Image (cartoon, helix red, strand yellow):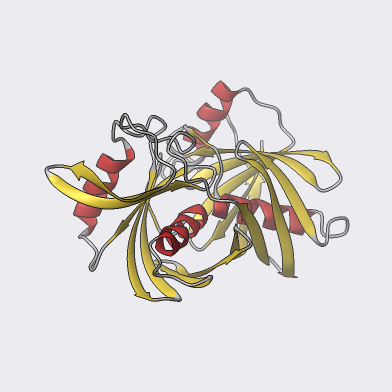
Amino acid sequence: MRIDKLQASGNDFIIVEGVEFNNLLRKEIALKVCDRHFGVGADGIVFLNLKENNKFDFRIWNNNGTEAEISGNGLINAGAYVALKYRDKIKDTVIFLTKAGERDVKILEVENHTVKLKVDMGQPIFSSDDIPFYDGTSYQKIVDYPLNINRRVYNVTILSMGNPHTVVFLDSFPSSFELQQIGREIESHAFFPNRTNVEFVKIIDRNNIEVLFWERGVGETLSSGSGSSAAVIAGRLKGELDEVVSVKTKAGDIIIECMEEKVYLNGVSQHILSGEFFVK
């Protein structure tokens, strides 16, 4: 099986194109290929299939063998893969058909093995029924909700970018051990039937934030595109951030733009390797 590995802000993905697998086999492949000791190693794997012209079917699986609806950096890396492979045919925009809906990725610049792109992340979802988040009450928006974790209450803001996110605003970050403990507890909290991603956010000023990420099905990651988007939207819901925000992650800065009710993720992807992976 041919594979390509790309990374965007330290969020690394394996890309597999043009091979039809059922979901059981995709889970098995994700577990094998993404293993950092016995496989290639990655946060997740993206399965692409060309539908027509510049449209691709997009399915993404985490390294624990669970399927995700969408991923911002997954889209950045998939867009870079298409830009590099199809550079003579596709020069402007790639359209990915994800489980969360259609997403456009604009190719801004291609240089050697590095690609700059802008992803239309779509409109954020705020309704608790659509996130989904269930505590017995329906909410139109969930801002500063008191979530009880290990006898402590965290005021969280909850939304979906096509995948669920829970944003925790802090004055200072917890230790790595505490982050993993809190992240794991929030991810699998009973109120989230599909579990949730978690972002720990420190606001620097109206145009700058710092974020630590706990990704559903992956654990702590260096960065996250959809997580950065969710963090900015949550800050705007609280009235503390402007339309363009620089998100400081452990792997570098990500620029998020909020325009006309949509969210745009600006990112850079680097092609790391191409090769053959022996599934059996």
Taking the spot 57% from the left edge, 67% from the top edge, the residue there is 257
Where residue 263 sits, quadrant-wise, is bottom right
Quadrant showing the C terminus = top right
What residue appears at the point 75 percent right and 58 percent down from the top-left corner? 83
261 left or right of 232 in image: right
- Residue nearer the viewer, 64 or 104: 104
Q: Is residue 125 visible?
A: yes
Frontmost residue, 279 versus 201: 201
Q: Left or right: 104 with respect to 189? A: right
Residue 266, percent from left and from top? 60, 66
User: In the image, residue 12 lies at what x, y percent?
Assistant: 52, 53
Residue 190 spot, x, y in % from top left = 29, 31
Is residue 280 visible from the viewing direction of this image?
no
Nearer-the-camera pick, 176 or 238: 238
In the rendered view, tell whether residue 149 sits above or below residue 229: above
Residue 58, compared with residue 238, is above or below; it is: above
Q: Compared with residue 45, is residue 238 higher up or lower down, i.e. above or below?
A: below
Residue 264 image offset from top left, x and y in percent = 61, 61
Q: Residue furthest left?
A: 151
The N terminus - image quarter: top right
Q: How many numbered circles are shown?
A: 0
Residue 25 appears in which quarter of the rendering?
Answer: top right
| Residue in the picture at 65% in, 56% down | 120
Residue 170, picture quadrant:
bottom left
